Amino acid sequence: MPFKFKLGFFTDIHGSDYSFKRSLNIAKSRKVDYLIVSGGLMAKDILLVEEIGGNYILNGKKVNLKNLNEEALRSGKYLIVDKKEVIEDIRSDKHKLEKLIIEKATEQMSRWIKMSEEIYRLDKIFWCPAHGDHPQLDSILKELGGKVINESVINLEDIQIVSVGFASPITGNSPREIPDSELYIKGKSLLKDSEKEKLIMNFHMPPLNTKLDITKAGLKKIHIGSKAVSDLINEFQPLLSLHGHAHESTAMDKIGNTIAINPGSLYQLGDPSVVTFEVHKELKGFGTVNVGIYIIKNIEFLSTNPLDVI
């Protein structure tokens, strides 16, 4: 039978409460049936603030803690405030710092889960931690009631979604970085039994040398995508592929018959960057036989919402 449903997708919000809430508001106002929230979810920046005699010091300068906290919520930063000697101890002990980062991420995910239920519907959201997200984030989200789909295949309204959050090495010391050859192997093992006519690939890395993987390096524009992901798209030809990682590359491209999308990210401004689209199943006649064909329609890139409230 013919049917349709609407999906929303956003990625790389890196700890911005503002961006997350505004993205949920878009999903609600656009009447999205399901929402995929992809990594990186955790903040990239940690602010260590010293409390000295009732004053708050960041990098040697006095700051207004209330304003700093608000800016952290907007642009995606974890704020750690304590006595000077405690902050110095944290700076010198990477294990203590990592423990505090996990605590901050857990607090934030708890807020986001609550927001998801209040604004949208938690049971309609699929979470996919990705590059830069601590390995514990998957279990944190699961314990809070989130549906985590990283490194898995799920069936959604007759559609298959295959998700991989790993990235090819960039810095060499970020969580969830693996060689491109390993990314190909992981992806292929998940895709091997898929049906391309009803397949959506949700791979954090964008395909190499496309409109989706362009970033700036000084005055130059360079491609930072994955050849493994390009090869997998060419090999399996999914209906649609969803990507992130290159924040500046809000774009759509075509790889063979596959529509490839990167909604980009505006997390540092606290703004949303969401893509929505409809999956239609239509009956096509071939002689005396009717066959169900899946089609992607009504793709929208959204970065503002007139009903938005923070």
Image (cartoon, rainbow, N blue to C red):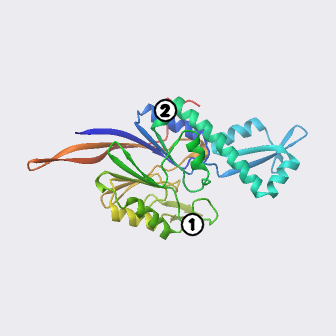
**Which residue in the protein does label 2 denote?**
120
Q: Nearer the viewer, residue 242 or 95?
A: 95
**Which residue in the protein does label 1 denote?**
169
Picture coordinates of residue 206, whole percent (x, y): 46, 59
Picture coordinates of residue 105, whole percent (x, y): 65, 45
Residue lying at 42% horizontally and 34% vertically, measured from the top left: 30
Q: Nearer the viewer, residue 106 or 282?
A: 106
Picture coordinates of residue 220, whole percent (x, y): 54, 65
**Helix, strand or loop for disc 2:** loop
Q: Is residue 41 above or below residue 117?
A: below
Picture coordinates of residue 42, whole percent (x, y): 61, 48
Comes first in the chain, label 1 or label 2: 2
Viewport quadrant of the C terminus = top right
**Helix, strand or loop for disc 1:** loop
Amino acid on which the number 2 mark rests in the picture:
Tyr
Looking at the image, how many numbered discs can be counted on the residues?
Answer: 2
